[in-house]
Image (spheres, rainbow, N blue to C red):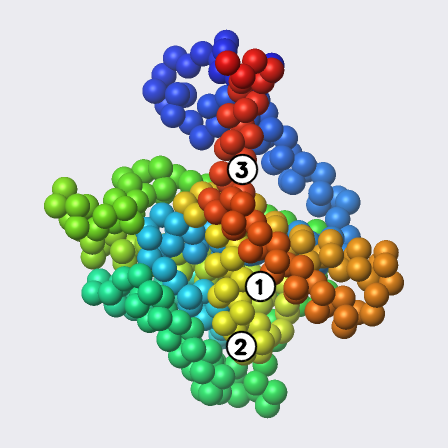
Amino acid sequence: MIYREAGDFKTSYRADGQTFPIRLERWGYYTVLAVAFGIIPFVINDYWANAVLVPFLIYAIAALGLNILTGYAGQVSLGTGGFMAVGAYAVYKLMTSFPGVSILIHILLAGGITAGVGVLFGLPSLRIKGFYLAVATLAAQFFLVWLFNKVPWFYNYSASGQITAPTREILGFAVTGPTTSAPAKYLVCLVLAFLLAWVARNLTRGSIGRKWMAIRDMDIAAEIIGVDPLRAKLSAFAVSSFFIGIAGALLFAVYLGAAEVGEAFGINKSFLVLFMIIIGGLGSIFGSFAGAAFMVLLPVLLKNVLVGNLGWPTDLAAHIELMIVGALIVTFLIVEPHGLARLWRLTKEKLRLWPFPH
């Protein structure tokens, strides 16, 4: 009875077009932000930071980036892992070359460098699309992994071939390196995820987002009505790669601390982020977060049940976990191919009518 527009009056176009038009939704949004910023940093421990919250926030940023490119602009990409590697190696080179500069600036610059690389590999999208573009981005994935693996300059001629994040601080608190506390990791990722989600939401609601969606729905018709395909597609690749580059930088510098390109940013990473946006919902900001939560939380839940409660061996539980996750993904796509975002919209529509459906 309380989730409906009745009595929730709007007196301006701006109020009518806001992201959360119903008062209850705004209260829920502000409550989530208050809990995320005001309570969790004081109670979080290493397990919850490393197993759940920090990877969830980082993959949500990557899913946002891929959703902009695939969900809003309609450009299929299988090179997410390679672009995350660009962000990781860019922030590593910046951290070791300019140790006096803030790590936040390094992370943003890593996103900018990844955006430039994304535009370069997005040029084929002007001539090809669909599966052919997917194959082109897959080639970018393999090329970038080969490049970071075979050119020693990228990992500062380390004998092991790994890159290791040195300790860096923000306001006196270490946010990278072995001494980083759980609240520091969580807050850095949370602030960037919040800001990037806000940017993505505003971009997709503005003229840029409408051009992306016009290209996605029918590129020839979009060009006839005045949309420049060159600018629209390349801007989608640039913004998407910026988000993915920041996610790669955070994954390496804040979460992993050390990485080898083949293991941390291989083709499995590209498919993982692609599964997130398909399960969460293409063309949805909420779907990016929901898909990331599903793919991060489900393995943790299964591991706790199979190993912690049932006492199964760890290696057997790992194989069973992969089978269950795969079966659930297939089942979910058959039952609701439009993702968790569509289920959330249906739930809200039913709540508006409840308890009188007619």
Q: x, y (%) of residue 223?
A: 15, 48
**Point 63% across, 30% down: residue:** 31
Q: Position of residue 183 (x, y in %)?
A: 70, 51
Q: Closer to the camera, 159 or 279?
A: 279
**Residue receiving disc 2:** 261
Q: Amino acid at mark 1?
A: Leu
Residue 212 in the image, given as x and y percentages of width and height:
29, 47
Name the N-terminal-most of marks 2 and 1: 1
Give SS at disc 2.
Answer: helix
User: Which residue is at a point 43% across and 82% down the rendered structure image?
Assistant: 147
What amino acid does circle 3 point to? Leu
Q: CA separation, marks 2 and 3?
A: 36 Å
Q: Given this view, does label 1 or label 3 mark the residue nearer the observer?
A: 3
Q: Residue 251 got which mark?
A: 1
Q: In the image, is 210 to the left or to the right of 46? A: left
Work out whether 164 lies above or below 210.
below
> Which label was assigned to residue 343?
3
Given residues 74 and 245, the one toward you in this image is 74
Q: Residue at the location (46% across, 87% down)?
A: 150
